[in-house]
Amino acid sequence: MQVLLRKSDDIQDKHDVQCSVCNQRFRIYWERTSDSERAAMRVIVLSELKAQHNNDLTTAAHPSALFNVPNWQGPAQFSGAAMLGGLSTIRRAAPAELDYTSKRVS
């Protein structure tokens, strides 16, 4: 299973997990909805957040952009977790050179 994580900086903002090293909060967008799968993945996510720290104990140790656990090589917004997890704040658009919606065909 894959999840997409987004930093949750606002103290009032809802969050799903919190890093045990720096207390940074994160929202999780789940690829699957089973409670048992989520519980197992939450353990993996917390371990990954801790591992990101290396020698930096601040919140800067975590990516500022969206990121997937486990790591995914493509853009985060096109991951299964983003698409199936309901992340609606990401604009899913084709690159400009492939966007023909604004070009007139003669």
Image: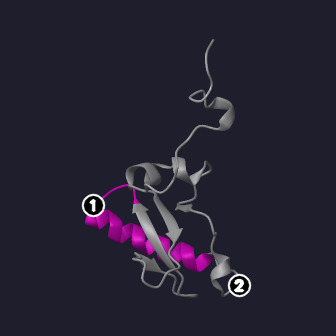
Q: Is residue 63 above or below residue 93?
A: below
Picture quarter with the N terminus: bottom left
Q: Secondary structure at mark 1?
A: loop
Of the pair 54 and 65, the residue shown nearer to us: 65
**Label 1 packing within 10 angstroms: few (<14), some (14-19), many (20+):** few
Q: Residue at x 39, y 77 (%)?
A: 14
Q: Residue at x 64, y 38 (%)?
A: 95
Q: According to the image, label 1 marks what residue? A: 34
Q: Can you give x and y, in whole percent of width and height, for residue 35 in the image?
A: 27, 66
Most distant residue in the right direction: 55
- Applied colour scheme: one colour
Q: Can you give x and y, in whole percent of width and height, for residue 100 in the image?
A: 60, 27
Q: Can you give x and y, in whole percent of width and height, for residue 106 in the image?
A: 63, 11
Q: Can you give x and y, in whole percent of width and height, for residue 78 in the image?
A: 52, 47
Give the magenta range: 30-51
Q: According to the image, label 2 marks what residue? A: 56
Taking the image as shown, residue 31 lies to the left or right of residue 75, namely left
Most distant residue in the left direction: 35
- Residue type at mark 2: give it: Asp
* Quadrant housing residue 66: bottom right
Callouts 2 and 1 close, C-beta under 8 Å: no
